[in-house]
Amino acid sequence: MHSYKTALITGASSGLGIVFAKRLAARGVNLIISARRTDRLEALAASLRDDHQVEVQVITADLSAADGVAKLIKAVGKAEVDMLVNNAGLGQIAEFATEDVAEINAQLQVNMVALTQLTREFIGPMLKRNRGAVVNLASTAAFQPVPNMAVYAASKAYVLSFTEALWGEVRGSNVKVLALSPGGTATEFFDVAGGRLAAGKLDTPEHVVDTAMAALENGNRRASVVVGRANAVMAFATRLVSRSAVIKLAAKIMKPNGK
Ligand SMILES: NC(=O)c1ccc[n+]([C@@H]2O[C@H](COP(=O)([O-])OP(=O)(O)OC[C@H]3O[C@@H](n4cnc5c(N)ncnc54)[C@H](OP(=O)(O)O)[C@@H]3O)[C@@H](O)[C@H]2O)c1
């Protein structure tokens, strides 16, 4: 991890993104942090510069906007990004028929399109330098369809499949690629999503990020890491029972607020 010079972290204004920024700054990695809420990014940048004497660039970008990714790439400029953490993401917990269309589009755009375009932008130079890492935030929701979270789960299934395939492409190089799949984690995610986990306990963002760091530092032997033993067992178990049974079980897990 010490060999990385500059990490670009999306969604660094909250939750997992803040912890990624702290953990990487503590390892002496310079940062480019991005999200929409500039005030939060500036406050984080100031504290990381003070605590760890690293350089931190703040870039405000809305990745759901048509020109969001291009703006972010332009602002990054010639900086040599050798670690990319595609962390920005959002979900909606609602019955699909009543889900807000703008929210559906934002999930598809941020979770899949922006993540793919940013990976495409930065992985080529990493491969040329034969050094780098890409961490893409999938989710335990990626391992089965999730009623009341249909779009989100499908978007994360995309992230998982895309990232695993990419791992398969770059394996011979010194570039690491990791799909990280946390279960429910105590961030602002559920406030934004408008619902709750009806079963299970929330993990801490620190545990999630430390799991990712360990997977990278241990050589990235696997394309995908599910955070937490129980989550890993559940993700594996989806392969052993019928798809319909899994969907019926998953339907009990995500509840919109007020239901
Ligand atoms: N928490 C969980 O239970 C959980 C479980 C599995 C996977 N994940 C994944 O983990 C990642 C981080 O989520 P979190 O739990 O840390 O949630 P969070 O606290 O809500 O943080 C989400 C981050 O994404 C950014 N973001 C959202 N919409 C954006 C947009 N249009 N443009 C740019 N940035 C945007 C937010 O920044 P601004 O609002 O300032 O733009 C924020 O920094 C997401 O990909 C999520 O799907 C979370």
Image: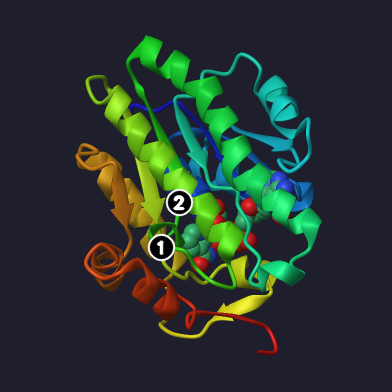
Q: Quadrant of residue 228?
A: bottom left
Res. 15 visible in picture: no
Q: Is residue 148 left or right of residue 244?
A: right
Residue 206 in the image: above or below residue 203: above
Which amino acid type is shown beneath numbered disc 1?
Gln
Q: Quadrant of residue 135?
A: top left
Q: Nearer the viewer, residue 210 or 105?
A: 105
Give whichever of discs 2 and 1 has the lower sequence position.
1
Residue 85 in the image: above or below residue 255: above
Q: Position of residue 104 (x, y in %)?
A: 71, 55
Q: Are marks 2 and 1 in contact (CB under 8 Å)?
A: no
Q: Position of residue 100 (x, y in %)?
A: 78, 63
The residue pinned by badge 1 equals 144
Q: Is residue 46 left or right of residue 244?
A: right
The residue pinned by badge 2 equals 157
Q: Residues within 10 Å of mark 2 (few under 14, many from 20)?
A: many
Residue 15 in the image: above or below residue 79: below
